[in-house]
Image: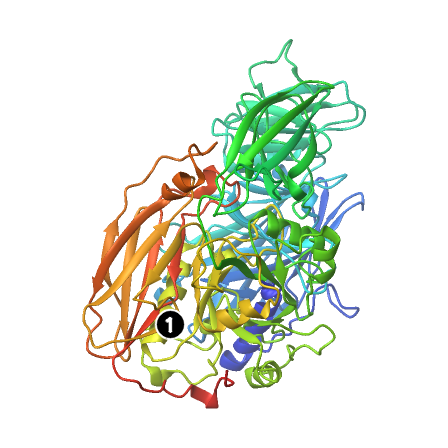
């Protein structure tokens, strides 16, 4: 998924507001234009200079010594709509240390004015920006918040209560700190936690600074009528924390310490009783530090380079008033991962977790398969990892079809520990391939992962087939597959994600797409030219990606699709082959996944057939894991044992077009009505319709409920039957017995059912859910397991599907 959506959303809002409410405002592009006028000022605090720009959403925060300058884009967030704060000289009331202004915003298609105030808080080295919610009932019924966006280096970002912030992350915490040398900049609110989102821009190349947005707690009639952000500029990394504690009204206490036996500077981190990082600061040369820390901090550790960290030390362990942290010499762990039954090496993902007083290691940035945070992707199951001395749990995973094995180790200085982890393929999938149909690496502008690292991450997740759907560029894994020599485990076709820009209306996945072929139009375009370009090759599969993703890039939102309405309401092109129902960016947003699932079922009830898919949309290694969720495509329904991958990857594409697929982030569902499988028709007059449902899951995946969903053409879908499934305790480690016995234990539900469909044409699908999130096993994948099938279509009397709106049609098979 592209994340330039914020820039595009700003333009959309400004243009719409100009048309609807006749605002004569000029929105300048990022950065001051040569003829730009500045307001009188600037305003100064002890270490900073704050300058506001006329006719622009820019606020400039510079340090008094000239070593740092940040341009901040200010906006008002009205519910989910981003509206830039653009001030004119006629709307201002200047004051010695700030300004007041009445600014227009668009609410429900009409202009409304809200009051904005800025002033310098000298005591806290801060600029305060406040937005007052007026008494008007039509405004107070909405949620208004302040939003600040600026460029940032990912290595400098820290959110109190969440920790180091990765690119493409969205978290909530007490304050955002951009801790770059020599002076930090922090954004906080006295009214509660702020929301922090890291984003990337189309204009940025991998390695260039990303952008980060901080959003205040919303002003609503129910809580408080003010939205507020403080921009805190401090003298040093250590000096920012007492200012933030004072702003938040958090009791604090001085902490003095030293990181022993280092050259240069280290980073110290203070955690609370729940293990959440609350404070992060850089030491002076030689490792000394003095700062005020919130009283909630109960333990500290220090870190240097990747994998080098001290033990956790209690905040009360200071000797002579000084906390001593020491990073001891480390050792190595040599990990081998094998298949329990064949003893062959397995490409897998290794997870390292600190035990007792040992912190989790950090092997590197979040986009490197060789080490991203506590994760290492191990090609052919062999890795030598350097670790600080301490106690660790080392685990290996190969995705949802395999068990997870783990072993506790103690790393001592200068020694190597040998570890063998054995996994079993406990969920048999004969004739079925695990597929990730929407995933990013270079040359996508917002994904610094190399194609080789991306392919390695996919194979380590147990993915058999994947598509490099790069933004408006054809992606091809051919060279990476050859370099890694994984062609026996992994196949692919080239692809592209059409990422519409300039008043964009959605993103669309297309594959196969021949390298060197001109990509479909994506700038200043409409949907019809995209369809013409895609359909020029009838072999291609064409799907709408993340159709409800906010920020102006969800196609169903932009066309106003209402699943509760009638078929006649749809006046736009919807003749895609498939719909990405389950997207990785929604994996922690179950309500949005349910919304798109209901959209999909409504479209089936309208009489149109689509393939439902799920894909990771992964842009990194550490976060939004490749392969979660995934689409399981049946390529040989009669297979009784595992088979080699098909020599022709178009076999996968062809079966995907036929909806021979299920979608999952954990459980695997088998649905059969006689010989009919998902995507097939069963011609029968019988009612109820006999079906067989089996749900399997690896020992570490939870399953607690199975639902049978039934729809009728020109009717309304419903859950026809539901069943509670006993939850099983989390199981990690060696799977005992024979492979057949281990596979039998993965069956969680297995029943013959009679499903009432009705007298007309209809369909049957199955949903499986789990209650226990997987984050306690897979870090950063804190999602409750979910799976669903494409439907089996029940045909009482053959009849053609209704025509697609707007002249849409699909090419003949």
Q: Position of residue 510 (x, y in %)?
A: 59, 73
Residue at 67% x, 48% y is: 367
Q: Residue furthest top?
A: 320
Vertical position of residue 95 compared to residue 22: above or below? above
Q: Is residue 643 visible?
A: yes
441 left or right of 797 in image: right
Vertical position of residue 307 compared to residue 604: above or below? above
In this figure, which colouring scheme has been used for the structure?
Answer: rainbow
Q: Position of residue 601 (x, y in %)?
A: 35, 70
Q: Position of residue 776 (x, y in %)?
A: 46, 37
604 left or right of 544 in image: left
Q: Position of residue 500 (x, y in %)?
A: 60, 74
Q: Is residue 372 visible?
A: no
115 left or right of 70 in image: left
Question: Quadrant location of the N terminus?
Answer: bottom right
Q: Nearer the viewer, residue 798 or 202?
A: 798
Circle 1 Cα neighbour tier, 10 Å, few/some/many (<14 / 14–19 / ≥20) = some
Residue at 64% x, 81% y is: 524
**Which quadrant of the structure image shows residue 354?**
top right
Residue at 23% x, 65% y is: 690
260 left or right of 489 in image: right
Q: Nearer the viewer, residue 372 or 160?
A: 372
- The residue where tag 1 is placed is 680
Q: Nearer the viewer, residue 307 or 433?
A: 433
**Which quadrant of the structure image shows residue 291?**
top right
Q: Which SS class for mark 1?
A: loop
């Amino acid at each position: 998924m592209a994340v330039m959506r914020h820039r595009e959303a700003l333009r959309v809002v400004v243009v719409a507001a100009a048309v609807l409410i006749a605002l004569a405002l000029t929105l300048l592009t990022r950065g001051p234009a040569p003829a730009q006028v500045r307001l009188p000022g600037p305003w100064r605090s002890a270490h900073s200079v704050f300058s506001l720009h006329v006719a622009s959403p820019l606020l400039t925060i510079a340090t008094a010594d000239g070593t740092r300058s940040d341009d901040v884009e200010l906006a008002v967030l009205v519910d989910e709509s981003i509206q830039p704060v653009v001030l004119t000289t006629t709307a201002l009331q200047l004051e010695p240390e700030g300004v007041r202004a009445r600014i227009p915003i668009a609410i429900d298609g009409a202009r409304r004015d809200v009051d904005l105030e800025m002033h310098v808080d000298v005591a806290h080295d801060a600029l305060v920006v406040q937005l007052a919610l007026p008494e008007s009932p039509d405004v107070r019924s909405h949620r208004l918040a302040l939003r600040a966006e600026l460029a940032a280096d990912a290595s400098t970002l820290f959110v109190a209560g969440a920790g180091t912030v990765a690119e493409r992350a969205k978290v909530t915490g007490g304050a955002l700190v951009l801790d770059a040398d020599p002076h930090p900049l922090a954004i906080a609110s006295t009214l509660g936690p702020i929301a922090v989102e890291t984003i990337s821009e189309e204009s940025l190349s991998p390695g260039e600074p990303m952008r980060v947005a901080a959003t205040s707690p919303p002003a609503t009639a129910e809580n408080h009528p003010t939205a507020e952000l403080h921009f805190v500029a401090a003298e040093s990394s250590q000096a920012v924390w007492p200012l933030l504690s004072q702003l938040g009204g958090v009791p604090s206490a001085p902490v003095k310490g030293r990181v022993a036996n280092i050259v240069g500077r280290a980073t110290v981190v203070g955690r609370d009783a729940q293990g959440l990082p609350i404070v992060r600061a850089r030491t002076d040369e030689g490792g000394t530090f003095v700062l005020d820390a919130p009283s909630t901090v109960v333990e500290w550790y220090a870190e240097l380079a990747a994998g080098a960290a001290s033990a956790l030390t209690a905040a009360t362990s200071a000797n002579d008033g000084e906390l001593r942290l020491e990073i001891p010499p480390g050792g190595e762990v040599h990990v081998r991962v094998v298949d329990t039954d064949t003893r062959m090496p397995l490409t897998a993902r290794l997870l390292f977790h600190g035990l007792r007083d040992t912190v989790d290691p950090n092997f590197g940035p979040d986009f490197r398969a060789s080490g991203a945070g506590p994760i290492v992707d191990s090609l052919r199951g062999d890795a030598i990892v350097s670790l600080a001395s301490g106690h660790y749990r080392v685990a290996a995973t190969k995705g949802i079809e395999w068990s997870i094995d783990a072993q506790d180790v103690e790393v001592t200085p200068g020694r190597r520990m040998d570890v063998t982890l054995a996994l079993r393929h406990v969920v048999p999938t004969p004739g079925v391939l695990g597929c990730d149909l929407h995933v990013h690496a270079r040359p996508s502008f917002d994904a610094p992962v190399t194609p080789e690292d991306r392919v390695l991450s996919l194979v380590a997740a147990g993915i058999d087939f994947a598509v490099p759907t790069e933004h408006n560029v054809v992606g091809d894994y051919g060279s990476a597959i050859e370099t890694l020599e994984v062609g026996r485990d992994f196949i692919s076709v080239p692809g592209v994600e059409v990422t519409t820009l300039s008043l964009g209306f959605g993103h669309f996945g297309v594959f196969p797409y021949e390298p060197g072929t001109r990509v479909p139009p994506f700038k200043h375009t409409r949907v019809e030219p995209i369809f013409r370009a895609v359909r020029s090759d009838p072999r291609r599969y064409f799907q709408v990606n993340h159709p409800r993703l906010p920020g102006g890039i969800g196609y169903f939102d932009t066309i106003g699709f209402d699943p509760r309405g009638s078929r006649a309401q749809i006046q736009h092109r919807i003749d895609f082959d498939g719909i990405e129902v389950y997207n990785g960016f929604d994996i922690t947003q179950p309500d949005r996944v349910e919304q798109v699932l209901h959209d999909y079922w409504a479209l089936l009830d309208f009489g149109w057939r689509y393939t439902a898919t799920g894909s990771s949309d992964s842009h990194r290694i550490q976060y939004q894991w490749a392969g979660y969720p995934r689409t399981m495509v049946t390529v040989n329904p009669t297979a009784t044992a595992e088979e080699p991958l098909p020599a022709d990857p178009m076999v996968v594409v062809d079966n995907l077009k036929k909806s021979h697929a299920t979608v999952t982030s954990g459980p695997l569902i088998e649905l059969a009505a006689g010989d009919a499988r998902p995507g097939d028709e069963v011609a029968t007059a019988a009612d109820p319709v006999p079906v067989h449902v089996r749900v399997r899951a690896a020992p570490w995946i939870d399953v607690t409920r199975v639902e049978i969903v039934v729809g009728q053409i020109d009717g309304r879908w419903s859950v026809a039957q539901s069943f509670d499934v006993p939850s099983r305790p989390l199981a990690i480690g060696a799977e005992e017995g024979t492979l057949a016995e281990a596979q039998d234990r993965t069956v969680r539900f297995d029943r013959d059912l009679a499903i009432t469909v009705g007298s007309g044409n209809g369909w049957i699908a199955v949903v499986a859910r789990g209650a226990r999130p997987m984050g306690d096993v897979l870090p950063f994948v804190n999602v409750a397991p979910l799976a669903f099938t494409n439907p089996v279509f029940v045909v009482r009397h053959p009849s053609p599907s209704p025509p697609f709106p707007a002249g849409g049609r699909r090419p003949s098979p």
